[in-house]
Image (cartoon, rainbow, N blue to C red):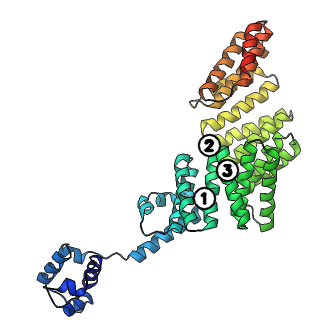
Amino acid sequence: MLGQRIKELRKEKKLTQQELSKGIITRSYLSQIEQGLVQPSFDILEKLSLKLDCSVDTFFKTIENKDLLLSQVKKEIKTAENQIESNSYEKVEGFIQKKDYLVHKELNSYDRGILLWVHGKYYEHKKDYNHSLAFFEESITELESSKHTNEMLRSLDSLGYVHSQINNNEIALNLLNKAYRIMIYDQIQGVIRVSILVNLGIVHGKLKEYYSAINFLQEASDLNDKMGTYYKSGEIFMAMGICNMQLKRYKGAKDAYERALNFFKLSKNKYYQAGTYTNLGILSSYKKEYHQADLYLRTAINIYKSVGSKESEIMNVQVELARVYYLQEEYDKASSICHDVLQMEDVNKHTAQALELLGDICFKLSDIEDSLKHYNRAKDFLVTQSISCDHLCKKVADVYFSIGDYQKASDFYKECF
């Protein structure tokens, strides 16, 4: 509407009706124009446009309803938040592409904090951890300033989780401990409490604090039971299984893994199913149930291949399968799988593990030259990746000791320390 547009432009210039109309028309005539009661001539419009520092065309441009636009943006943010909460990441793709939302000046701290969290979770799902960390950190800042504790805790929990995924475990622990203290002080309940407890359990497990890890995980499981929910139940029992396996509580580990597998099957999460089968295979190997270990590990490999997983994930299971054959003294089968791993394009810690296992096989077969070659290749690789190789130095030393080269054996034993 022409009159409404002239009124908006006048207010943007901070002019009164008297100031704008002066020397052109009367104030009352301008008032009638703004109310849409009269239609001004082109000559009047041209003079008004000069005073408002715009063109006549500007008067006829479609007027945006800013309140309606902001309401629509907020609605889209809420929809994206719900889609992330329900793990519908594919539905958020289009929303993430709307980069202009991130610089929307009308958004308050709460809405901007949620918007940033949504972006962080999307990039976390894509395993683009650098971007997700930046979004979560900014989200925490926005939500802290607006005093929205539950949402801020969610972002803090997400930030801690991502740090744990890239093995910044000390940083993750500090962030999650902060979240835990706020959670206790403000008596926060619900799924955010479960999530913080689960992530604390996982980080404590990574730091080899298995007993405290199990306590956090059990508390999360108990809270789920109390609420009648199954939030992150698969992850809870998977982590419990790992901790129990490290503590050599094999029955407890198997029970936990089987419960985790049931939850992952219900949620149709193939990726986590494969991870659970891998851990069941490793557990069976520890218990010397080699036939069962073979079945579990081959199932894991088939699932990983069916969902197009990364080579590194398949290589991890292949090394474990090769180790099962090694323990049964089926050296040809073990060696063949190790060579398959070395043919992969991805080069990672599993490459070093395959080389180490080949060194073990050669040593068992008294092939000293090849044994040392494989051990040293594995050792050199770990050094370039800044990964400890003390155990390999000991193996090299043992080889030299076995052939009576005590000086070299001594030198490598010293390297262990």
Residue 188 locus on image (x, y percent) = 71, 67
Image-based side of 233 in relation to 55, left or right: right
Label 3 environment density (alpha carbons within 10 Å; few <14, some 14–19, many ≥20):
few
CA gap between label 1 and label 2 equals 17 Å
Residue at the disc numbered 1: 155
Q: Point out the tag, 1 or 2, that comes first from the N-terminus.
A: 1
The answer to whether one can see residue 266 in this image is no
| Label 3 vs label 1, nearer the camera | 3
Type of residue at label 2?
Ile
Residue at the disc numbered 3: 174
Type of residue at label 1?
Ser
Which residue sits at x=20%, y=83%? 20
Q: Are marks 1 and 2 in contact (CB under 8 Å)?
A: no
Q: Is residue 280 above or below residue 190?
A: above
The secondary structure type at the circle numbered 2 is loop
Which residue sits at x=80%, y=10%? 402
Which residue sits at x=77%, y=41%? 208
Q: Point out the tag, 3 or 1, that comes first from the N-terminus.
A: 1
Residue 32 locus on image (x, y percent) = 23, 92
Question: In terms of depth relative to the viewer, which is nearer, 195 or 365?
Answer: 195
The secondary structure type at the circle numbered 3 is helix
Q: Point out the tag, 2 or 3, that comes first from the N-terminus.
A: 2
Residue at the disc numbered 2: 166
Type of residue at label 3?
Asn
Label 2 environment density (alpha carbons within 10 Å; few <14, some 14–19, many ≥20):
few
